[in-house]
Amino acid sequence: MDRNKRISTRIEADFEAYITIGEVVTPVSTRNLSLKGALLYGCEDCVAGTPCELHLPLSPGIRIVVTGEIVRIKGSYAAMSFKEMDELSFTFLHRLVTLNADHPEEVDEELLRIFEKF
């Protein structure tokens, strides 16, 4: 997809994380993040359409936990679409994206567009 057509602000993010698919836990690293998904490196065994859970430790005792689905695979990269997260994980993710975005005001505008759909 053309970068200019994306609806979600993406930030470059190189975090160590892990993804759980069924009973299998795989260490991965993030390449970019948005409020709606992540690009993960190191997910060679991931398959598109597979439900998963991403754990992104930010510091001791603070982590973002998101359930979702692998939507695309390209080599060692897997694109994950976020489906559900608790309020605290959303708060941390929102703050992380906002603080690292080139245009932080656009992040809240994206949220407003999402909520207007409900």
Image (cartoon, helix red, strand yellow):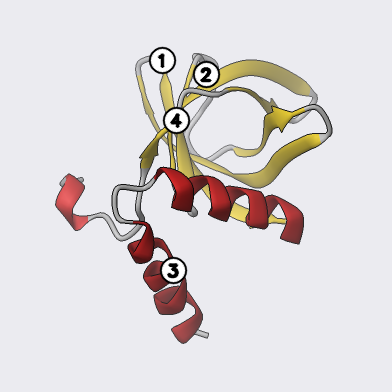
Say which of 63 and 81 sits in front: 63
Q: Label 1: few (<14), some or many (≥20) within 10 Å?
A: few
Of the residues under marks 4 and 2, which one precedes in the sequence?
4
Q: Which mark is residue 13?
A: 4
Task: Name above or below for residue 72 compared with residue 60.
Answer: below
**Residue 83, position as x, y percentages in the image:** 60, 55
What amino acid type is highlighted by mark number 2? Cys
For discs 4 and 2, the disc positioned in front in the rendered view? 4
User: Would you call the spot at circle 2 few (<14 residues within 10 Å), some (14-19), or many (20 or more)?
Assistant: many
**Kind of residue indicated by mark 4:** Ala
Quarter of the image holding residue 114?
Answer: bottom left
Front of the two marks 3 and 1: 3
Q: Earlier in the sequence, mark 1 or mark 2?
A: 2
* Upstream in sequence: badge 3 or badge 1: 1
Which comes before the other along the chain, label 4 or label 1? 4
Residue underneath mark 1: 76
The residue at which mark 2 appears reads as 43
Measured Cα–Cα span from mark 4 to mark 1? 17 Å
Q: Is residue 45 left or right of residue 99?
A: right
Which residue position is annotated with label 3? 108
Task: Give residue 5's quadrant in the image.
Answer: bottom left
Q: Earlier in the sequence, mark 3 or mark 4?
A: 4
Residue at the image position 73 percent from the left and 61 percent from the top: 87
Question: Number of labelled discs?
Answer: 4
> In this rendering, which labeled residue sits more in front, label 2 or label 3?
3
Crowding around mark 4 (Cα neighbors within 10 Å: few <14, some 14 to 19, many 20+) is some
Per the image, label 3 sits on a secondary structure element best described as: helix
